[in-house]
Amino acid sequence: MDKKIIACKMMKDELEHIFEVHGIDLPIFWKDDTLHANPEKLKAELQRQIDAIEEPSELLMAYGNCGNGLLGLKSGVHRLIIPRYADCISMLLHQREDLNTLRTNTYFVTRGWLNGEMGLEKEYDYSLKRYGEKRTQRIMDALYRHYQYLMMIETEAYDPEKEKKRVANIGKRLNMKPVYVSGDLSILEKLLLGDWTEEDFIIIEPGEMTVLDDFSGNVLDARQGM
């Protein structure tokens, strides 16, 4: 089977970096980065894309199971290869044993998230334009009051120094302390290079579909950053 990639635009920096490093040249279907905020729309668009590809293929899904958005996907004539992770945060920080604790008080970003349609800067600026400074601050405080830290995941796919000023400014606006950590692209590399270990990947054969047990309970609400 030929390989094709279906990917969230949020991960474009990281995936294109891996393409360049490893000389990968595969067809890729980029999906809007706002879809992960609505799991039903995400699932519907992914299923539409899967069904639209006529030639039987191995479809490499550069997605985690954000909000259960990948549950119930039908492979049709294809073979689906899916990371066994709750979201892209889990993939990039899979070596962090304290990740579940971090999620309780930390908002995560990469450059892709900062630049996305749901990025914090755009959200703040839109609210500021519509409601004014005082009301915007009340709205932001209500939305993000339980986050203490704004964590930028540095993935080697871009120069983090160019983004740190933005992160610091966002943190000041939203009363979050900026922190910076190194991310790990090895799960995405394995996906693209065909190293599909059972521990890290789900393989859905033609005619099958994804079920909750495939993800071993790895399901999270999408609104924690990325």
Image: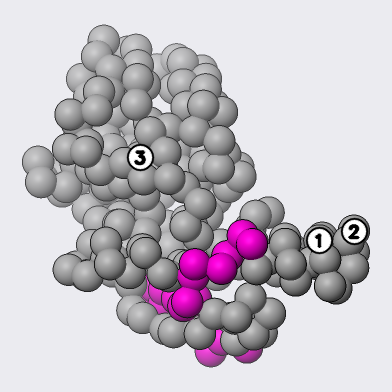
* Residue 158 in picture, x, y percent from top left: 50, 76
Q: Which residue corresponds to the image point at 22% horizontal and 70% vertical from the top-left?
A: 98
Quarter occupied by residue 184: bottom left
Q: Give the left or right position of residue 155, taking residue 190 as reference.
A: right
User: Residue 107 has which mark?
Assistant: none
Q: CA distance from mark 1 to mark 3?
A: 29 Å
Q: Give the left or right position of residue 104, taking residue 28 as reference.
A: left
Determine crowd level at label 2: few under 14, some 14-19, many 20+ residues with C-alpha closer than 10 A. few
Which kind of residue does numbered mark 3 sit on?
A: Asn
Q: Secondary structure at mark 1?
A: helix
Q: Which residue corresponds to the image point at 36% horizontal and 63% vertical from the top-left?
A: 103
- Residues at marks 1 and 2 touching, judged by CB atoms closer than 8 Å: yes
Determine crowd level at label 1: few under 14, some 14-19, many 20+ residues with C-alpha closer than 10 A. some
Q: Which residue corresponds to the image point at 49% horizontal and 67% vertical from the top-left?
A: 146
> Any magenta on residue 163?
yes
Instruction: Identify the residue position indicated by label 1 in the image.
Output: 127
Instruction: Identify the residue position indicated by label 3 in the image.
Output: 65
Q: Which residue corresponds to the image point at 35% horizontal and 40% vertical from the top-left?
A: 65
Quarter occupied by residue 180: bottom left
Viewer-closest of 107 and 133: 133
Q: CA distance from mark 3 to mark 2?
A: 33 Å
Q: Secondary structure at mark 2?
A: helix
Report the magenta residues as a range. Answer: 142-165
Q: CA distance from mark 1 to mark 2?
A: 5 Å
User: Residue 130 has which mark?
Assistant: 2
Q: Secondary structure at mark 3?
A: loop
